[in-house]
Image (tube, grey):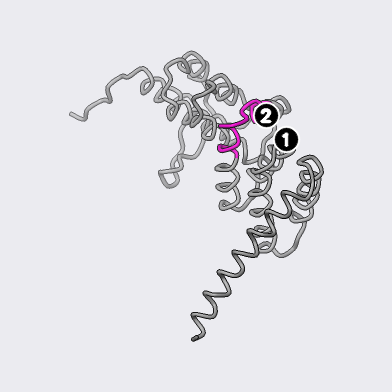
Amino acid sequence: MNAADKHLSAMFDADRSLRRAEEAFLESAPPGPLLDILERSFAAAEKLEDDDESVLRILRLVDLAAQLEGEKAVTILLRALDHHEPSVRVEAGEALLDVAYDRFKEVGRAIERLLDRKHDGTSMEELPFVLAEIFDPDTLPLIVRFLDHPSAEVVACAIEATVQRGDPLAIRALEKLLDDKRRVSLPDVEDAEAPIGDLAADAIATLAGEPEDEES
């Protein structure tokens, strides 16, 4: 067996050991105590000086939290959605979406708490898009609440999420933003900015099914 074969075999063994350890962990106690452990481990992982090790641990904790029921599981996923590393936010967003399909009340209540206290982490820019992918129950009323957030960037994300959602019922809420002069960066255009009011107007036109202006 050459070196490459040995490394591949070692990876197979590591994957097998990981699955066994995960199963043993999930079966070792009820969800409540396990979530307490995950919560403490998450806090410890955030404080690590080695960023690679921190990300590695948090990704594993996200995967485990998504497999457990309880509000603390959702809280862990939301904390991960505030992480500075994009790969962690992607993993947390996908996990949160999976949990929301099965237990939306837990997810919805947790998001409402963030909105009530005007939380301003990066999760607030990600959550409108997560919600836009859920159609049962109707999450539009929750998406619309993000339009009232103090952060212009969060509002811009919520506007885009209403377009992604494609529900004309969002138009009334968007109309309240038409005079909003706050400027935000346009993600797809380098060094470009636009007022919130203009983004709202474009979203309204799209949701209303108005044809785009043709160049003469």
Q: Residue at x 38, y 21 (%)?
A: 207
Give the residue furthest to the left.
216
Neighbor class of circle 1 (other Cα within 10 Å; few <14, some 14-19, many 20+) is some
Q: Secondary structure at mark 2?
A: helix
Residue 156 position within the rendered picture, expressed as x and y whole percent measured from the top left: 51, 31
With 138 as the anchor, is 188 left or right in this view?
A: left
Residues drawn in magenta:
96-109
**Residue 60 higher or lower than 11, as above or below:** above
Residue at the (71%, 65%) spot, across then down: 50
Q: Horizontal and vertical percent for residue 200? A: 46, 24
Residue 19, position in %: x, y?
63, 58
Secondary structure of the residue carrying tag 1 is loop
- In the image, taking residue 15 as reference, residue 44 lies left or right, namely right
The x, y position of residue 93, in whole percent, is 57, 42
Query: Looking at the figure, which quarter contains the C terminus?
Result: top left
User: Is 4 left or right of 31, judged from the image as shown?
Assistant: left
Q: In the rendered image, which residue does mark 1 sit on? A: 70
Secondary structure mostly seen in magenta is helix
Q: Residue at x 68, y 45 (%)?
A: 65
Residue 145 sits in which quadrant? top right
Q: Are marks 1 and 2 in contact (CB under 8 Å)?
A: yes
Judging by the rendered image, the residue that carries numbered circle 2 is 106
